[in-house]
Amino acid sequence: MATLAETYACAPSTERGRGILISGDPKSNSILYCNGRSVLIRNLDRPLDVSVYGEHGYPVTVARYSPNGEWIASADVSGVVRIWGTHNEYVLKNEFKVLSGRIDDLQWSPDGLRIVACGDGKGKSFVRAFMWDSGTSVGDFDGHSRRVLCCAFKPTRPFRIVTCGEDFLVNFYDGPPFKFNSSHREHSNFVNCVRFSPDGSKFISVSSDKKGLIYDGKSAEKIGELSSQDGHKGSIYAVSWSPDGKQILTVSADKTAKVWDISGDGSAGKVKKTLACPGSGGVDDMLVGCLWQNDHLVTVSLGGTMNLYSASDLDKSPSSLSGHMKNVCALSFLEGNQKMILSGSYDGLIVKWVLGVGCSGKLQMKDGAKIKCLAANEQQIISSGFDNKVSRIHLNEDDSKAAENVDVGSQPKDLSLAANIPELTLVSTECGVILLNSLKVACNVNLGFTVTASAIASDGKEAIVGGQDGKLHIFSISGNTLTEEAVLEKHRGPISVIRYSPDASMFASADGNREAVVWDRASRQVKLNNMLFHTARINCLAWSPDSSMVATGSVDTCVIIYEIAKPASSRITIRNAHLGGVHGLVFTDDSTVVSSGEDACIRAWKLTPQ
C-alpha cells in the first residue's frame, strides 16, 4: 500500500505584464492559486499541507472560496466555471459555460447565491453574473469595449458590482438584476485590479498608470487616491485590503510591495511600509499578485516565488514558498547530511528540496536551457537539455557561478553517471553514445541504429543502450573503447528508460509499449517479467536502495511498484499520482518513493507491505 506523505507544490502560473489572482479562506487560513489545469489549495500555517484539484480540461485562471468556505468556484481559459465542494473528494456541484473566451476573475456574492465572472468574450460579452445553482443570468453588463481584467462584489447590501479592464474604465453596476450605473475613466492605462473594502464603504482600483484611486462604495464617486510620494514606480498589478479595512497592500512591476494607511474617509492613502522582496533584482522579481489574509501578507513574483510577511511585524524577514512552474521531467536524490531531492523542469529550473522541510534553494540555468535529463552525486549536478549541451554545476560552490557545459552536437536523449567514478558520464544521442570524462569528450561512437535510452554501470565498465527497435545492446567499456557484447530482445516498443540496480546485480528496462522488464546482469536472463500493468508509455523507473523493488511511472498518471522477489501481479499501484503523466521517480529510502510530473508538483509516497 502507498500513502501520500508530502506534496511539494508547484508555484502559481504567472504571465509577464499581467497580474495574477490568488484568494483564500480566512477561517481555514488556506489560499487558492492556479497552475496549468490544477487548482492548488495550500495552508499558510502548514505549507506542506497541499491539496490539488485537477478536473478542468483547460488551464485554470482563477479560483475562489464561497463565503461559507464550503464551495470553490474555479474558471479556465475556455470560459467554463466549475463549482465543487471543499470536502468529500471535491464533488462537482455544477459546471457552466459562462463566457466565450478566457475568464480572468470571478467573485461570489456575500450571500453565496450569485457569482460574477469577467474576462475575454465575443462582441461585448465581457462580464456575466449568474445564479450559482442554476446558471441563470442576473443582469446585463454593458459599458466595456475590451477585455475585463477584474470584478468585485460589494460585500454588504445593497449589492453592487464593480469591474475594470483594458479599456481604462472602472464601471459600476446596481442590482440584482444588475444594470449599468456609471463609468470612470480617470486611469490612463490598463486597470488591473479593483477591490471593495471589507465593510463595503469604499473600493479601490489600481492600474498600469502607477495610480490607485479610491471610490465611495455606494455612489461610486471618486473620493481620493494613493499618494504619489513614495509611490510605485511601475505598473500596479494587484491590491488587497486588510481585514479591518484601514490598510491596503499593493504590488508592482517595480519589484516592491507597499502597505498603505487609508484615511477614515478614504480621501488619501499614505505609504506605511515598503516591502523589498528578496531576490536577485531580475525580471523574475517583478511582483504580480498579492493577498492580505489574517496576519499574513502574501506576495507573488513573476518567477512564482511567494513571500509571506507578518502584518503585525512588517520588519520581520519574510518566509518564502517556491517551486516549479512547468513539467518536472527529472529527479535525483542525494543522501548526504540533509536528505536532498533535486528536480529539474522543462523551463531550465533546478530546485533543491529537503525532505520534511520543502524548498531549500533553486538554480536557474543561465542560458535558459530547457532541461530534459538530470543526474547528480554529492559533488555535482549534470543536466542535459534541448540545446545540444550537457552542463555541470558544482554543488559545493556559489550557486551563482555559471554552469560549465559541453556541446555534444545533437540533442541528448539520456544521461547517466557511473556511481563509483563521479567524473564519468554516458550521454546518448539519436545516433550513438558519447562518453564524457570530467565534461570532456572521451569518445563519440556512432552505433548505426536509432538510440532512445542508455545507462552506465556504477564501475564504468559496462553500458546498456536501448533502441527505437526495442532491442537492448550491452557494451563493455575499456578505456575509451566500447565493444558490443550482447543484444537482448524482449521489448515490443522503443526503449524509454534503462537503470542498473544499486547492488549492480540487475538492471531494469521499460518501453513505449507500456512494458517493463527486470534482467539478471550476470546471466542476462529475464528475472521479472509480465510487468504490463500501465496503459501508456513508461517514462521513468527507479530502484529502491536495497535493490528489492523497482518503480515505474507512466503517461497514464500512475506509479507502479514491484517487488523483485514476488510475482508482478502483487504490485502496489498509485493512481493519479500526477495530472498529465509521471516523468520522474526516485527512492529516498527502502520505503519512500518520490515522483514528479507534468503538473509541476513533487510527491513523496510512503510504502507499507501488503
Image (tube, rainbow, N blue to C red):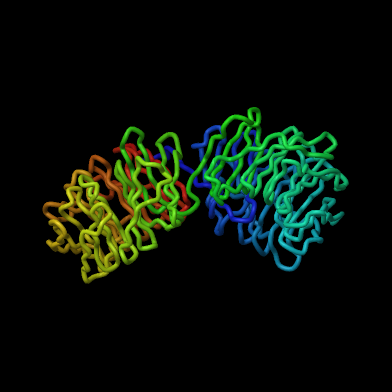
Query: From the viewer's perspective, is residue 386 above or below residue 13?
Result: below
Q: Is residue 322 left or right of residue 81?
A: left
Residue at image location 39% in from the left, 47% down from the top = 595
Q: Is residue 431 left or right of residue 73?
A: left
Q: Quadrant of residue 196?
A: top right
Image quadrant where one finds the C terminus: top left
Residue 588 in the image: state x and y as whole percent: 33, 40
Residue 433 in the image: state x and y as whole percent: 24, 62
Residue 200 visible in the current orientation: yes
Q: Nearer the viewer, residue 186 or 14?
A: 186
Q: Nearer the viewer, residue 556 or 8?
A: 8
Q: Is residue 456 left or right of residue 28?
A: left
Residue at image location 87% in from the left, 47% down from the top = 221
Q: Residue furthest bottom?
A: 448
Residue 12 in the image: state x and y as whole percent: 55, 48
Residue 528 visible in the current orientation: no
Image quadrant where one finds the N terminus: top left
Q: Quadrant of residue 297?
A: top right
Query: From the viewer's perspective, is residue 282 above or below residue 473?
Result: above
Residue at image location 81% in from the left, 48% down from the top = 160
Q: Is residue 165 left or right of residue 418?
A: right
Residue 454 in the image: state x and y as whole percent: 25, 58
Q: Residue furthest top?
A: 312
Q: Nearer the viewer, residue 278 or 143?
A: 278
Q: Disc count in the image?
A: 0
